[in-house]
Image (cartoon, helix red, strand yellow):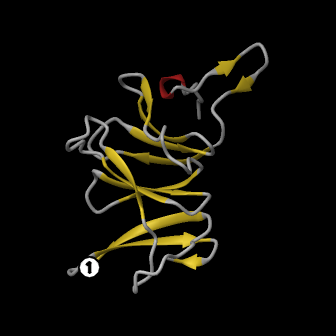
Amino acid sequence: MAWELANPFGILVDEEHDAWHTGRVTALLPVQGTSRVLIGSDGGGVWDCNPVEEYAKPLSDDWDDPDITALIQGPDPSLVFAGTKGGSVYVSDLSGAGAGPLGSWRQVDTVDATGKPVRPGRIWAGVVMSTAATDRLILACDNGLL
């Protein structure tokens, strides 16, 4: 396999010191129907990247918990969840409705069936399970399944 630099994703290489300057990339999610890729990083939040148009734009500049550990596709391709090291969950409507072309992100409350707050710990992975009645976001966390 031939490797090539990922500079279209905003990744810079310091050739003199043979060093990468991206931080740790912890999650990748292609945006269905586009040439875009969402990149989650440890400490750097979520980035919207497009190798065809050669841009990378931050989506999470104002997040309290930007240590991304998981990116999860919702049942609709424009719906994405981001899980973090601190146990936060953010959701975005990537269709951009009312918030420009990158959509708007908001933090989601993590609560149990009674509405009591839950502390999931680090979120490792997730999946959206669809049934006839509803969609459920299931998260694999330090403190079990949420």
Left or right: residue 140 versus residue 17 is left
Residue at image location 60% in from the left, 30% down from the top: 3
Residue at image location 66% in from the left, 36% down from the top: 23
Please say if 138 is above or below 96: below
For the residue carrying disc 1, how many other residues have a C-alpha within 10 Å: few (<14), some (14-19), or many (20+)? few
Q: Position of residue 123 (x, y in %)?
A: 57, 64
Please say if 78 is above or below 111: above
Q: Quadrant of the N terminus?
A: top right
Left or right: residue 49 versus residue 131 is right
Residue at image location 55% in from the left, 71% down from the top: 140
Judged from the image, the secondary structure of the residue bearing numbered disc 1 is loop
Which residue is nearer to you in this view: 17 or 66? 66
Q: How many marks?
A: 1
Q: Position of residue 65 (x, y in %)?
A: 56, 51
- Which residue is labeled 1 in the image? 131
Left or right: residue 99 versus residue 107 is left
- Res 55 quadrant in image: top left
Q: Amino acid at mark 1?
A: Thr
Q: Residue furthest bottom?
A: 114
Q: Position of residue 118 (x, y in %)?
A: 52, 76
Which residue is nearer to you in this view: 1 or 85? 85
Left or right: residue 69 versus residue 131 is right
Residue at image location 44% in from the left, 76% down from the top: 111
- Res 112 quadrant in image: bottom left
